[in-house]
Amino acid sequence: MILQPEAEKQSNLRALPRVLVSVLSYNSAQNTADTLRSLQQQTYPNYHLQLVDNASTDDSLKHIAREFPDLDIKVFTENLGYTGGNNRVLRQGVAEGYDYIILCNHDIEVDEHAVAHLVETAKFHCDTAGVVGGIEVSLNNEPRRRRAAVATAKYSKWTARASWLSQSVANKFMPLEVPYVHGAFVLFTSRAIRLEVLMDEKLFMYFDEFDIGFQLREKNLRAFVDPRVVVRHRGASNQFDSREGYLMQRNRLYMVQKHGLWYHQLFYHLYAGLIELPAKVCLRSLQGHTRFARACVEGHLDAWRGRMGHAGRRHT
């Protein structure tokens, strides 16, 4: 059979994995617009781009809809957090028959081959890949070094802290297996989602990448990073944001409770309660960041009380 050019093009397109690229946004018109423009330039031909608004309280959605009139936009009626919002997207992607679902922060930019590279790596490791990520750099001109957007294997169940892969990783061109992939721009395989590798909605946001890493190993799946994919990430503009302080402190204790053994938990309670948290509160208060210090204490106490997810209403 001799196919006409258009029919041949459609046939070739159907042979490629279907990819859903989803941007989760909340109260951010300009950053989201920059991200969408970046994602619209992708060379990979068989992908669908959508925006998911996580119940924004400003007029950002109106601005986005005006600038991108043909964009597929979904709107949640309540803020489900990073974890809850993206879980809905992951389930949606599998239900609609996508092979891969790429989750994107609303404050990133990537080059035009980013989606193609993630898909290529996922296909190459099709028997084991659960998630695939890239290399993160700052868009805020911060004086920090380029870093791989993955944590090292030295994530500590004793202190719930992790370091990041070194500068040298950014100079490699071959995908590498890693323990954890940062969530700013990450591909999930449909296989992983069907095996219930999903985000823990009790976290709301932050530390989700480490929890996913634990889940992948439990399901005999792997995480990979493709150093060809560079994710330019703005991140938070306020270093001492009280919401971030609350959630980070709360989720650290929760992660130790969820994944640590009894001796990890005992050590962390003593370490955080008697050393780290008092020192942090004193230092930040002396620096004038009393609201941030108070939020950290509230986060730690709420984890003790089991107040997760939306529980910290003042901060989430």
Image: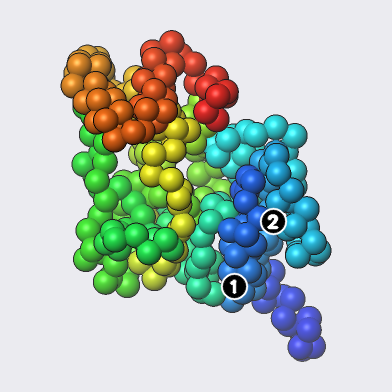
Residue 88 shows in the view: yes
Specify the quadrant that holds the N terminus. Answer: bottom right
Residue 222 shows in the view: no
Q: Is residue 34 left or right of residue 51?
A: left
Depth order, front residue of 148/180: 148
- Image vertical order of residue 109 relative to residue 164, above or below: below
**Residue that badge 1 annotates:** 42
List x then y, in percent, for residue 127.
Answer: 43, 53
List x then y, in percent, for residue 121.
Answer: 43, 64
- Image vertical order of residue 221 relative to residue 231, above or below: above
Q: Dot 2: within a 10 Å radius of its alpha carbon, few (fewer than 14), some, or many (20 or more) residues?
A: some
Q: Which residue lies furthest to the top in this view?
A: 305
**Residue that badge 2 annotates:** 50
Depth order, front residue of 55/221: 55
Q: At x 36% / y 55%, what residue is drawn?
A: 149
Q: At x 29% / y 35%, what residue is drawn?
A: 287
Q: At x 68% / y 73%, what residue is drawn?
A: 13
- Image vertical order of residue 17 relative to residue 43, above or below: above
List x then y, in percent, for residue 16.
Answer: 62, 69
Q: Which amino acid does label 1 sit on?
A: Gln
Q: Is mark 1 on a helix, strand or loop?
A: loop
Q: In this view, does 82 lie to the left or right of 51?
A: left
Q: Distance between the residues labelled 2 and 1?
A: 14 Å
Location of residue 238 by image quarter: top left
Q: Which amino acid does label 2 sit on?
A: Gln
Mark 2 and mark 1 lie on one chain; the one further toward the N terminus is 1
